[in-house]
C-alpha cells in the first residue's frame, strides 16, 4: 500500500516535473549552436537522466512520510458497519473530506483514491513495452550469430587503421551479414560491426571507410550501452510525450556527434555526405538496439544539410531563449522551495490532521529516518494551529534527535491558536538540555505569551539559566512583552544580574520600556555605579536617546569627569551628534 501511494504520486507529479525539464532543454537547445553536437548531446542526455530521477525522488520522499499519513488516516477513519469488498487493486486509504483549503491540496486529495489505478495502468504498460524491448534485444543478439561470415582482409585492415585513428582501445570484430541492410554496430563489451554484402560491393573503399568510421565512433563513445539505458528509461516513462521528445533529441545529437568524428577522420564533409546518400539506397529497417550510420537518429536530409550547408546567421534571438531558460529555472526553484508539503506530506496529511487523534503521531514522526522529512512533517502538524497538536509538538521538541526539527516544533508551538502552546514553550525554556532550543523557546515566549504567564519564568531564566545567551534572550523577551509589569524585573536585572552583557541588555530594554523620567534615574545610576564599562557605555547611548534632551546634563557631566576614558569619549561623541 505504501509503495502504491509512493509510485502513484511519483507518476502524477512526473507529468509536470518532466514537462518542465523538457521545456528547459528546448530553451537550452535554442541557445546552443547546431554545430555544437557534443554540448547538445550532453544536455539532452542529462535531461533524460533528470526526467527519471525526478519521479524516483518523489517516490522516496512520499514513502518516507507515508507511515505518518497512514497513522493519521487510521486514526480518523470511521469504523465500517461490516466487511466490504471491491474489485480491482487494493485502494489507498482515503482521508476524511478536508475543509476548504488551497486548490492544489484539494486536487491532490481528490486524486488520492485513483492512485492504485494509475499504478496498475502504468505497470501494464511497462510490462507490455518490456516484452517488446526484450524481443528487440533477442533479435539484436541473433544478428551477430545468424547469416554472418568473414569480411575480406582489406576491410579488417581498414577497421584496424580507423580504430587507431579514433583511439578505440577495445577489440572490434567486423562481419559480413546477410540479414542487415546497412552497416550497424551491436554489443558493448565485445562490439561487432555488421556490414551488408551490398555495402561491400556497392560502395567504394573510401565510402566504406567513412561509414566504418561512423560505426567506430559509436564504439568509442559507448553509444550501445547508452542506447540500452535510454530504451529502459523510455519503457519506464512511456506515458510522457516529453520523454519521447527528449529521447529523440538524444538520438539525433548522438548521430551528429558520430558524423563529426567520421568527418574528422575522412577529412571531407561533402565526401562523407555522398557516402551517407549511397548507403541510403540500401537502407531498410534497423533493429532496435543496433546503431547504424544511416539509421534511426533523425532525418538523413537534416544530417547532410548540417554537414555541408554553410553556417547561417541565426535569425532567432538567442537572448530570448536565455530569458526563457532562466525563467524556467527560477520557476523550478520556487516550486522546490515552496512545494515541499505537496510531495512531503503524502498529498492529504494536512486535511487528515484536522480531525486526527494525535497521541500516536509522536512515534510516527520520530520513526521517519530523514530529518528533512521529519522537519516537513512537524511543519505540517503546526500549520493547523490546532491546540490538539501541542502534546506531540512538545514531545518532538524535547526528544527529537535533530536540532532543526526541535526548532521547528518550538516555532509551531508559538503559532497555536489562543496561546495554547505557551505553557509548553515555558516548559521547554525551563528544562530543555540544549541552550539553543531554550533560547528559541524564550524568544517565542516573548513574541506570543501574555505577560501574566511569562513574567516570573522569564525573570528566573534571566537570573539563573546556565547559558548567558539564554539569559540575554530572556531579558529581551521581557522587553518584548510590552507590559508595565515587566519594568520592575528589568530594573532589578539591570542593577543586580552578575553578567555584564545581560545587564547591558536589561539597561537597553528598560530604557525602551519605562517612562523617560524613570529611565533617566536608572541610566544615571548605572552610568555612575555599574562596574562594567560596557554597561556604562550603554547607559550613555540610552541617555542620548531620551526625548526632550532629558539626558543631556548627565552626558555633559560624564564627558567632563567620568573616570572611564571610553565612557568620556562616547559621551562627547553623542553630545557632538546632538548639536
Image (cartoon, rainbow, N blue to C red):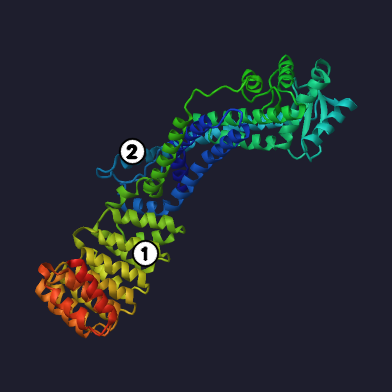
- Identify which residue, 440 or 308, lies in the foreground: 308
Residue 248 image-quadrant placement: top right
Asked whether residue 571 appears in the rendered view, the answer is: yes
Residue receiving disc 2:
107
Residue at image position (30%, 61%) is 411
Residue 375 image-quadrant placement: bottom left
Asked whether residue 187 appears in the rendered view, the answer is: no
Mark toward the start of the polypeptide (2 vs 1): 2
Q: In this picture, is 130 found above or below 350?
A: above
Residue 341 locus on image (x, y percent): 37, 48
Q: Which mark is residue 406?
A: 1
Q: Nearer the viewer, mark 2 or mark 1?
A: 1
Q: In this picture, is 419 found above or below 182?
A: below
Residue at image position (61%, 23%) is 298
Q: Is residue 28 left or right of residue 254?
A: left
Q: Is residue 380 left or right of residue 419?
A: right
- Image quarter where the C terminus lies is bottom left
Q: Is residue 404 left or right of residue 546?
A: right
Question: Which residue ends up furthest to the top in the rendered image?
Answer: 281
Which SS class for mark 1?
Answer: helix
Amino acid at each position: 500500500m505504501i509503495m502504491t501511494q509512493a509510485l502513484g504520486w511519483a507518476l502524477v507529479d512526473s507529468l509536470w516535473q518532466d514537462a518542465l525539464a523538457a521545456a528547459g532543454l528546448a530553451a537550452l537547445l535554442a541557445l546552443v549552436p547546431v554545430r555544437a553536437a557534443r554540448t547538445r548531446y550532453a544536455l539532452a542526455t542529462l535531461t533524460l537522466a533528470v526526467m527519471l530521477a525526478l519521479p524516483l525522488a518523489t517516490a522516496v520522499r512520499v514513502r518516507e512520510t507515508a507511515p505518518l499519513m497512514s497513522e493519521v488516516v487510521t486514526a480518523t477513519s470511521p469504523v465500517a458497519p461490516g466487511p466490504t469488498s471491491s474489485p480491482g487493486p487494493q485502494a489507498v486509504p482515503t482521508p476524511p473530506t478536508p475543509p476548504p483549503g488551497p486548490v492544489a491540496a484539494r486536487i491532490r486529495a481528490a486524486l488520492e483514491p485513483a492512485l492504485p489505478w494509475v499504478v496498475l495502468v502504468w505497470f501494464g504498460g511497462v510490462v507490455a513495452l518490456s516484452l517488446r524491448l526484450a524481443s528487440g534485444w533477442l533479435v539484436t543478439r541473433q544478428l551477430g550469430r545468424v547469416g554472418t561470415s568473414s569480411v575480406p582482409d582489406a576491410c579488417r585492415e581498414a577497421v584496424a587503421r580507423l580504430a587507431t585513428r579514433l583511439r578505440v582501445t577495445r577489440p572490434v570484430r567486423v562481419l559480413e551479414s546477410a540479414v542487415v541492410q546497412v552497416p550497424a554496430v551491436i554489443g558493448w563489451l565485445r562490439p561487432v560491426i555488421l556490414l551488408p554484402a551490398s555495402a561491400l560491393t556497392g560502395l567504394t573503399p573510401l565510402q566504406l571507410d567513412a561509414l566504418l568510421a561512423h560505426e567506430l565512433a559509436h564504439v568509442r563513445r559507448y553509444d550501445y550501452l547508452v542506447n540500452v539505458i535510454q530504451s529502459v528509461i523510455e519503457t519506464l516513462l512511456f506515458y510522457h510525450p516529453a520523454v519521447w521528445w527528449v529521447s529523440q533529441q538524444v538520438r539525433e545529437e548522438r548521430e551528429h556527434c558520430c558524423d563529426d568524428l567520421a568527418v574528422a577522420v575522412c577529412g571531407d564533409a561533402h565526401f562523407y555526405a555522398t557516402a551517407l546518400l549511397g548507403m541510403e539506397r540500401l537502407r531498410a529497417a534497423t533493429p532496435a538496439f543496433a546503431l547504424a550510420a544511416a539509421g534511426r537518429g533523425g532525418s538523413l536530409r537534416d544530417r547532410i544539410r548540417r554537414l555541408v550547408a554553410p553556417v547561417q546567421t541565426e535569425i532567432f534571438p538567442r537572448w530570448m531563449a536565455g530569458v526563457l531558460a532562466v525563467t524556467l529555472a527560477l520557476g523550478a526553484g520556487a516550486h522546490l522551495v515552496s512545494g515541499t508539503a505537496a510531495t512531503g506530506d503524502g498529498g492529504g496529511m494536512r486535511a487528515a490532521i484536522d480531525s486526527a487523534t494525535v497521541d500516536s503521531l509522536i512515534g510516527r514522526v520520530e520513526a521517519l529516518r530523514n530529518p528533512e522529512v521529519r522537519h516537513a512533517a512537524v511543519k505540517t502538524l503546526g500549520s493547523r494551529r490546532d491546540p490538539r497538536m501541542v502534546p506531540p509538538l512538545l514531545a518532538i521538541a524535547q526528544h527529537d534527535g535533530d536540532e532543526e526539527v526541535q526548532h521547528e516544533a518550538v516555532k509551531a508551538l508559538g503559532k497555536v491558536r489562543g496561546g495554547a502552546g505557551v505553557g509548553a514553550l515555558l516548559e521547554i525554556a525551563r528544562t530543555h538540555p540544549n541552550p539553543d532550543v531554550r533560547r528559541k523557546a524564550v524568544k517565542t515566549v516573548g513574541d506570543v505569551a501574555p505577560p501574566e504567564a511569562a513574567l516570573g519564568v522569564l525573570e528566573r531564566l534571566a537570573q539563573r539559566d546556565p547559558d548567558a545567551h539564554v539569559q540575554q534572550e530572556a531579558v529581551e523577551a521581557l522587553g518584548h512583552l510590552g507590559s508595565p509589569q515587566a519594568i520592575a524585573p528589568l530594573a532589578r536585572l539591570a542593577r543586580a544580574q552578575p553578567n555584564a552583557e545581560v545587564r547591558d541588555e536589561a539597561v537597553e530594554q528598560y530604557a525602551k520600556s519605562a517612562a523617560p523620567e524613570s529611565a533617566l534615574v536608572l541610566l544615571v545610576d548605572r552610568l555612575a555605579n555599574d562596574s562594567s564599562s560596557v554597561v556604562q557605555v550603554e547607559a550613555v547611548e540610552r541617555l542620548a536617546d531620551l526625548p526632550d534632551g532629558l539626558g543631556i546634563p548627565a552626558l555633559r557631566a560624564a564627558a567632563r569627569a567620568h573616570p572611564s576614558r571610553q565612557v568620556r569619549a562616547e559621551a562627547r561623541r553623542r553630545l557632538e551628534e546632538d548639536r
